[in-house]
Structure formats: structure tokens, C-alpha cells
Image: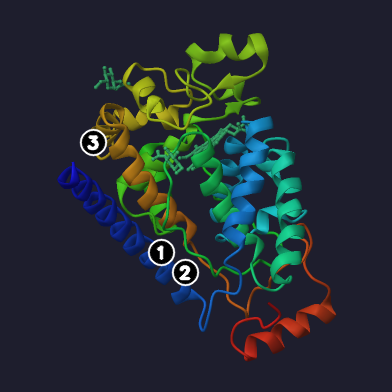
Amino acid sequence: MAIRRSIALAVIALFAASAAAMAADEEEEVMSLYQPRDPCPQVERIVKQAVDEEFKKNNQITAGFLRVFFHDCFSRGCDASILLDGEWDAGVNRNSVHPRVRQLMNEIRVKVNKQCGDQAVSCADILAIATRDAVAAAKGPNVTTIPRGRFDSLTPQDISKLPSPLAKINDLLTLFTQFGLNDPADLVALSGGHTVGKTTRACGVARPDFRDTCNQNGQQVLDVITPNEFDNQYFVALTRNKGVFSSDQDLLNHTRTSALVRSFANDKQAFFRQWATSITKLSRTNWLTPSNGQIRRDCTKPNSKRLLISNVIDADLGFPASA
Ligand code: HEM
Ligand SMILES: *[C@@H]1O[C@H](CO)[C@@H](O)[C@H](O)[C@H]1NC(C)=O
Ligand SMILES: *[C@@H]1O[C@H](CO)[C@@H](O)[C@H](O)[C@H]1NC(C)=O
């Protein structure tokens, strides 16, 4: 009895030690970007609470965040430019990004401003960690490596690089490489974002055999097996020739991507591991700094000119000093 108990304690101690080591690593990752200190550790809890609460009412928020985050990072970089008028309503973003994402971002913004001051965490950082948390809420992986330290764009950005659902895999590989996602596994894993969400306007671009379903209800789920769960069934669907866009289905036929599709279809953990690596890489795309970006007090509007001057002064001091 005593022996069994001490073994149990040893196991618990071992577990606690490795959990502590992991937490220390994560902290180091965030801290290295915030010298001399993290100006708002509370943001992680504030965002997770808000996203979890929203997900209970509206599980489509996961798809909303994923698409908005991807489109943000693939304009100029992960700088929350997509939340500004002029990009939010531009081209393919118009009517295809969820309005609720922008509202929820500002609800979170208000809470963060209250807890940490309005110059501690950028909208771009909030968007990155909210997307991570929305994936976890839909039973996806818990990604612990999303760094913070981005600054927000002053202006909306050009979205002309966003890929077409008719794009060829070679062109998608080239495009992703331009954004630092140079491993074909990045394209395959991130295409796995289509494990949730719907297309409403894409009857014309969905593959011909999907047009009927699409026309009947005006909406086509992107993962035909488990449409609302963040899992590997999108890849299983590809192996059954049930990918909705040709940019999805063709991943199974390209020499540089087909083995990856099969491996993710066979092994959810393999997909989750690669997802964690690739979404972290995506989240690092082309950050702005205090000299060319700002921390928006309202995620949908650049700060006024007077406030911009105070940002520059803060930047001279090192990290924004208001927290
Ligand atoms: C690889 C190239 C990609 C192409 C060509 C592509 C294309 C598309 C298209 C055409 C739609 C339908 C939009 C509509 O009907 O309004 C869509 C939806 C979506 N995309 Fe992608 N996408 C790509 C990559 C990604 C990536 C990397 C992510 C995230 C990691 C992502 C996440 C989503 C989500 C979640 C939806 C559903 C949105 C909703 O339910 O409102 N996509 N995508
Ligand atoms: C993520 O963490 C939550 C809470 O600790 C846990 O319930 C869930 O199973 C984890 N998800 C995965 C995929 O490991
Ligand atoms: C794609 O690959 C699958 C399986 O390898 C094959 O059955 C199918 O015919 C291929 N499709 C095209 C269009 O090449």
C-alpha cells in the first residue's frame, strides 16, 4: 500500500515537473519578445474565456477566425489590417468573412484595455491567439507556441495575393513560400483549416460534382464528413475524392503533397503536430514594429494622429509604457 502510494506520488511529481518545464518554455518564448517584461499576461485568459463563451453559442466562430486570420496574414502580414474598412469589405472578404469576428475582437479589445491599458497588446496579437483558442474549442490541438509582439497596420492592405479555389498546387506552393511557408507540409496542414466552415458563394467554383448540394441549400460544408469539428476528416474526405475545391482535391495528386494528405488522413496526431508548426509559422508572417505599426485602441480604426505621436514616444522608451 505504502509502496503503491509512493509510486503514485512519484508519477504525479514527474508529471508536475514536466508541466512546469513546458510552462517555463512557453513563458520564455513570449518573454523574449517583450523585453523587459510581458506587458499583459492576462490577455491569454481574457481571450480564451471570450472565445469559449462565443463557441458555445456559435460554433461557426472557429471557421470565422481561421479565414479572417489567414486572409490577414496573406495580405501584407499578420497585422490586423483585415479589421480595417477597406480591407474587411474588399473583394473576396466582402460577405465571406464572419461579421461576428470583428465584433468579438472589439469586445475582447475593451476587456484587454481595461485590464492592461490600451497600449499593451495589439489587435494582431489578439487575433492570433483568439484563432488558436477557437481551434482548440472545436476539439482541435492546443497550440502553445503562438508568440506575441506584433504591431497593427495603420492602413488596409492589398488582398490581391489571396489564392483562388481554382489555383494549381504548384502556384499555391510558390505563393506559400513567398510568405515564409516553404515546406509543402505547411500548405497541406493549413489547407486542413477547411476541416471546418462553409462556402456560400462558391457554387460556381466548387467542383462540378458538388454543385447540386451547393445549389439546394446555398451552402456547402468544406469537410463533408465532420463539418464542425477540427479533426483530420477533411483529409479522409480527400482520399475519397470528396474535396470541395480543386485546390483541396488536387493536394492528393501532386507529388509534393499527396503523401502528406495520406499521412494526415491516417493519423490525426500527425496532422495536429504539423498544424501546430505551420500555424505558428503563419502567425510570424511579416510583423510590423513600433516604428511602422501601432497598437490600435479600437481594432476597426487606426488611432488618431495625436495618439500616433505618443506611440512614437513610447517606442523610444522601449516597450509601450502604459501597462
Ligand atoms: C490553400 C489555399 C486556399 C484557398 C484556395 C482557399 C479558398 C477558400 C474559399 C474559396 C472559401 C469559400 C469562401 C466563400 O464561399 O465565401 C474558403 C473558405 C474557408 N477557408 Fe480557405 N482557402 C485556402 C486556404 C485556407 C487556409 C490556409 C485557411 C486557414 C488556415 C482557410 C480557412 C478557411 C475557412 C475556415 C473557410 C470557411 C469560412 C466560413 O465558414 O465562413 N483556408 N477558402
Ligand atoms: C486541449 O486541452 C484541453 C484542456 O486541458 C483538453 O480538454 C483537450 O483534450 C486538449 N485537446 C487536445 C487535442 O489535446
Ligand atoms: C488523383 O489520384 C488518385 C489516387 O492516387 C487517382 O485515383 C485519381 O485518378 C487522380 N486524379 C487525377 C485527376 O489525376
Label 3's element?
Answer: loop
Between disc 2 and disc 3, the foreground one is: 2
Image quarter of residue 38: bottom right
Front residue of this view, candidates 43 and 146? 43
Sooner in the amino-acid sequence: mark 2 or mark 3 = 2
Image quarter of residue 211: top right
Residue 215 at what x, y percent from top left?
A: 64, 12
Three-letter amino acid code at disc 3?
Thr
Q: Residue at x 67, y 38 (%)?
A: 54
Front residue of this view, candidates 7 and 71? 7
* Cβ atoms under marks 2 and 1 closer than 8 Å: yes
Q: Is mark 3 within 8 Å of ligand 3?
A: no
Other residues around mark 3 within 10 Å, as few (<14) / some (14–19) / many (≥20): few
Three-letter amino acid code at disc 2?
Val
Front residue of this view, candidates 185 and 272? 272
Q: Which mark, by number, is residue 49?
A: none
Other residues around mark 2 within 10 Å, as few (<14) / some (14–19) / many (≥20): some
- Quadrant for the C terminus in the image: bottom right
- Residue labelled with disc 3: 255
Between disc 1 and disc 3, the foreground one is: 1
Q: Which mark, by number, is residue 26?
A: 1
- Residue labelled with disc 2: 30
Other residues around mark 1 within 10 Å, as few (<14) / some (14–19) / many (≥20): some
Position of 32 compared to 239: left or right? right
